Amino acid sequence: MQNFEFYSPTEFVFGKGREDECGAYAKKYGAGKVLIHYGSGSAVKSGLIDRVKKSLSDAGIGFVELGGVKPNPRDTLVYQGIELCRKESVDFILAVGGGSVIDSSKAIAIGVPYDGDFWDFYSGKQIEKALPIGVVLTIAAAGSEGSGNSVITKEDGMLKRGTGSDLIRSRFSILDPALTQTLPAYQTACGATDIMAHVFERYFTNTREVEITDRLCEAVLLTMVKETPRVIEDPDNYDARANIMWAGMVAHNNIVGVGRSQDWNSHGLEHELSGLYDVAHGAGLAVMMPAWMEFVHSHDVMRFCQMATRVFGCQMNFEDPETTALEGIRRFREFLHSIGMPINFEELGAKEEDIPTLVDKLGVGDGKRAGFVELTAEDCAEIYRIAAHASL
Amino acid sequence: MQNFEFYSPTEFVFGKGREDECGAYAKKYGAGKVLIHYGSGSAVKSGLIDRVKKSLSDAGIGFVELGGVKPNPRDTLVYQGIELCRKESVDFILAVGGGSVIDSSKAIAIGVPYDGDFWDFYSGKQIEKALPIGVVLTIAAAGSEGSGNSVITKEDGMLKRGTGSDLIRSRFSILDPALTQTLPAYQTACGATDIMAHVFERYFTNTREVEITDRLCEAVLLTMVKETPRVIEDPDNYDARANIMWAGMVAHNNIVGVGRSQDWNSHGLEHELSGLYDVAHGAGLAVMMPAWMEFVHSHDVMRFCQMATRVFGCQMNFEDPETTALEGIRRFREFLHSIGMPINFEELGAKEEDIPTLVDKLGVGDGKRAGFVELTAEDCAEIYRIAAHASL
C-alpha cells in the first residue's frame, strides 16, 4: 500500500425532503447572501428552486439566482456568475443540480475573490482562496458533491480543463434520492455508468496489497449491479435510488481509491468523444471502458479475474484464467447494454473515420499516457477501434 | 434506507514515517502550545515521543507532556491533564497512542475551556466548546481517530460513560502502520476483533434496502478475515498491518453504518465483562459477539445467511437456511479462536456464577435493551450463559 492523505470534510445530509434544510445549513456555514446556481428549467418547473428560496428566506438569508448551466459547463456562464456575485456582494454559492452545476459553482467560487482571469486556475495555477459552496444534488453521477475537483469547458476552442483543491469542497451536500426520480432512464443509466467508471479507474492499479480499497471498490460496484436495473425498471424506486445516490458519493470522494496508483485513461479517451460529438459523458464511458479493458486485460489477467468473480459472479476457470477475465468484461458490457447504454460507435453516434482526429486531440504525440498500462498514440487508436466495433 | 447525516472532517495522513509530520500538521491546525498525551512507557522507550517532540520543535511549537493513560482511561488523569493545560496555556491536544489515549485527550479537550466538572459532559450535558486535538495512532482497534466519541471511566465506582460531538473529532490523524508492528499478537488480535465488532454492530439491522452499507460492511469484514491471520503469523507484515489500520478507521467513522438502525448490544454486554474482570475489550467481544449472534439469529435467518455466504464463504443451504446461518456464526467463532482470542468464559477468565451480577449491572430491570432484537434481563442472562459454555 502506498502512503496517502484522505480528507473529506463535507457534511452530507441525506434523505427525503432534506433540501428544505438548505437555508439552515447555509446559515450554519456562514452564508449572508447566496447565489443560487442551477441548470435547465426543470429545477424551476419542478418547484425545487422555489423551495430552496423559501428555505433560504426562512433562514433570513438573501439570494440572487443564475440558471442556464449546460452539460460540460462553460466558462462564459462562469464569467457571468462571477460578475453577478461581485455586484450583489454574494458570499456563498449554492449549487442546485448535478455535476455540471456543481463544477460551475466551484469555478465561480474561486473566481470571485481573484483579481485575474478564473481560467488561470484551470491552466495550472494553484487555488488560494474561494467562496464557500453548498450543494443540493439532483443527479447521481459525477460525485462532485463530495470531491475537490471541477471541470470547465472554454467555449473558444471547446477546451475542457480541470482544477482541484480542498478549498472547493462543498461545506454541505444535501442528497435527496427523491429528486432523482424524475430523471429519464437514459440519463439515470448514464449516471450509473459514470459512478461505476469512477470506481474502475481506481480499481485497475499496479499497487499490490490494497485489499481494503479493492473490497470497498467492489462494494460500490456490487451495489450498482444490483440497484441500477431496478431504477431502470421502476424509476420511482426510492430505495434503489438512495443506494445509487450514496454509492455515487462513495465512488468519488476517493475513499475507494486511497493507497494505490489509479488509471483514468478511459475518462481521458472518453473526453475526446464527448467533446467531438457532444454525447453524454456516461454514454461515452459505456463505449470506451470495456474497450479499454479488453485492450489492457493481459497486463494483469488475475486482476480482471478478481473483477469477474467478485463483481460479476463468474466462475473462475483455473485452467485458463484469461477466459474468466474476458468473461468478466463481456458481462460488464452486457450489463451496460441491459440498462440502455450504447456499446459501440454506431450506437453512440461516433464514426470510425474520426479516430485519427480523436487520437490527435488526445495530444499523446510520441509520448505515452501514464496509467495501469502506458498508452502510445497507436494504443489509443486501437482502443478506439475496439470500441467502434464492439458487440455483445 | 433511513435519512442520515454523515460528517467525517478529519484529515487522515497515512503511511510509513508520517508521524514525523505531526508538527507541520499541528501548525496547520493552529497549535501554539501542545499537550502531548500518551499511555505506557513503550511510546517513550521506542523513541516515538522523542520524534514527536522533535517534529513539534521543528515546527516552532512548544509543548508539555502527560503520560500514564491506562486501558479504560480514567477521570483522575483527565483532571490532571485539564489542570496542566490551564497552567501551561496549552491550546492543542496531541494524542499519541490508541483509543484510550485519544478518548482521554478528547475529555481533556472539552474540560479545559469549561468552568464546571468535565464529567458533566459524560452525564448528558451537550458539548459546546473544545480545544482542537490531533492524533498519532499506535494501535488499530478503537477507531477513535475517526470518530466523534469518547468513553471515560470514573474511578469512584468504576462507572464507564461516553460522550459524543463533532467538536471532539480529531483535526488530523496520522496513521503509520509500522508503529503497530511492535504490538504483541494478543493485543493485535484484540484490536482486530474490536474492528470487526464495530462493523457487526452496524451490520445487524432491521432497516431494509441498505445494500450500499451492507456491502461496505462486508468489504471491511472480508479484509479483516484475510489480513488478520497474516499479522498474527508475521507481526512485521507492513501491508497487512496497513490494511487493518485503515479498515479500523473505516469501521468506525460510520461510513459503514449510515442509513440504518444499529445494534450495539454486544458492546453493552461486553462492557460489564471488562468492567468486572478488567479483561481486554476485544477479548470480551470475542466471547460475547458470537454468543449474541446465536441468541438472535432466528430473528432474521436470511441476514445471517448473507453474512455466512458473503463474509465467511459458506455455501448456501437453500433447503435449510438456518444451518447456513449457524455455520456462519460457527466460522466466525473459529476465526476468533484461530487468531488467539478466547471464545468462552473459562478462556476469558470470567465466571458463570457472576452472571446475575453482570445482568444486574446492565440495569435492564423490567425493561428491554433496544437493538436488532430487544433484550430483557433474562435474554441477557441467556446470552451470557451461551458465552460461558461456548466451544468450537
Image: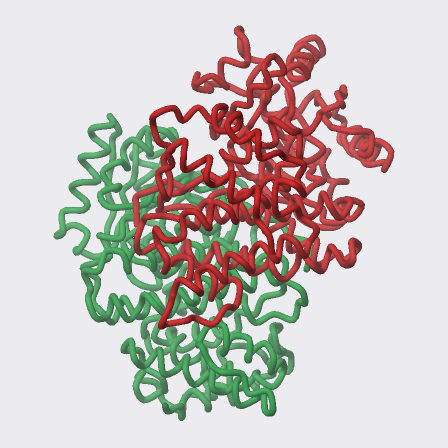
Chain colours: A green, B red
Spot occupied by residue B65 in the image (x, y as percentages of width and height): 76, 21
Quarter of the image for the N terminus of chain A: give it.
Answer: bottom right
Tell me if A330 is positioned left or right of A381 in this view. left
Quarter of image, res A365: bottom right
Front in this rendered view, residue B241 or A354: B241
Q: Above or below — where is A298 with respect to A257? A: below
Spot occupied by residue A243 in the image (x, y as percentages of width and height): 34, 57
Q: Which residue is found at the position 57% from the left and 31% from the top? A: B353
Front in this rendered view, residue A306 or B295: B295
Extreme residue in the front direction: B353
Tell me if B85 is positioned left or right of A85 in this view. right
Q: Which residue is found at the position 80% from the left and 32% from the top? A: B49
Spot occupied by residue B316 in the image (x, y as percentages of width and height): 43, 70
Front in this rendered view, residue A16 or B183: B183
Spot occupied by residue B6 in the image (x, y as percentages of width and height): 41, 42
Q: Above or below — where is B302 with respect to A346? A: above
Tell me if A245 is positioned left or right of B185 in this view. left
Q: Which residue is found at the position 20% from the left and 30% from the top? A: A57
